[in-house]
Image (spheres, helix red, strand yellow):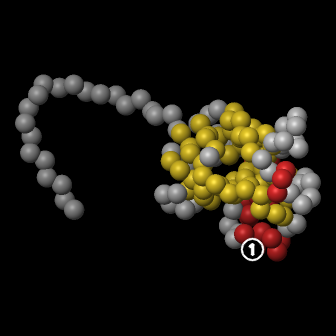
Amino acid sequence: MILLEWNTANVVVVTLTEKQTFTPLQYLFLFKSGNKGKMYGCAAADISQFTARYNEFIITQKDSSPNFLAGEITLGESGFYSYTIYGIDQVLTVPQIIAALAMTAQELADTYDIEELETGKMRYIKTPTAIAEFDAARENKTVFQNT
């Protein structure tokens, strides 16, 4: 399982080399929200010093102007996402990464020289925002909700 925290350079360590049939020029991370099914994604470079043993990436969640080519991503709400990591034998541009979010796995394979390397779950933790509380005198109120 991958754990990503809001506004942090998250180190993601996975073992992809054992599943590769070629050395990818780029790794594509696709995340699908468990609540709404919305797709998010980015490309990240492998920074591992021992690629035969493990692969290491930095993925940063940013709220505005992410660089999709440098492992930066803008995710939705906190919660669980499913993820797929692909190895690609070419370097994608930002418009190609955005287009890939709308493609199925078969469409990706038909469009690019790509292989699926890993799937799993990711948990995204967004820092809770402070909520101002008002502590008034206690009193009983009857509240009705229209449904």
Give 81 or 70, whichever is nearer the viewer: 81
Using residue 43 as the reference point, say whether residue 81 is left or right of it.
left
Q: Quadrant of residue 65?
A: top right
Residue 44 on image: x %, y %:
79, 46
Does 132 appear above or below 2? above
The amino acid marked with disc number 1 is Gln
Q: Quadrant of residue 55?
A: top right
Write the residue at 87% across / 42% down.
Answer: 51
Residue 54 on image: x %, y %:
81, 42
Residue 67 showing in the rendered view:
no
Give the residue at mark 1. 106
Write the residue at 77% across / 47% down.
Answer: 15
Using residue 90 as the reference point, say whether residue 36 is left or right of it.
left
Residue 64 on image: x %, y %:
64, 42
Number of numbered tags placed on the structure image: 1
Write the residue at 37% across / 31% down.
Answer: 131
Give 66 or 108, whichever is nearer the viewer: 108
Secondary structure under the numbered disc 1 in the rendered image: helix
Residue 54 showing in the rendered view:
yes
Does 75 appear above or below 86? above
Disc 1 packing (10 Å; few <14; some 14–19; many ≥20): few
Using residue 77 as the reference point, say whether residue 109 is left or right of it.
right
Using residue 132 as the reference point, say whether residue 110 is left or right of it.
right
Residue 16 on image: x %, y %:
80, 51
- Quadrant (top left/top right/bottom left/bottom right) for the C terminus: bottom left
Write the residue at 69% across / 71% down.
Answer: 104
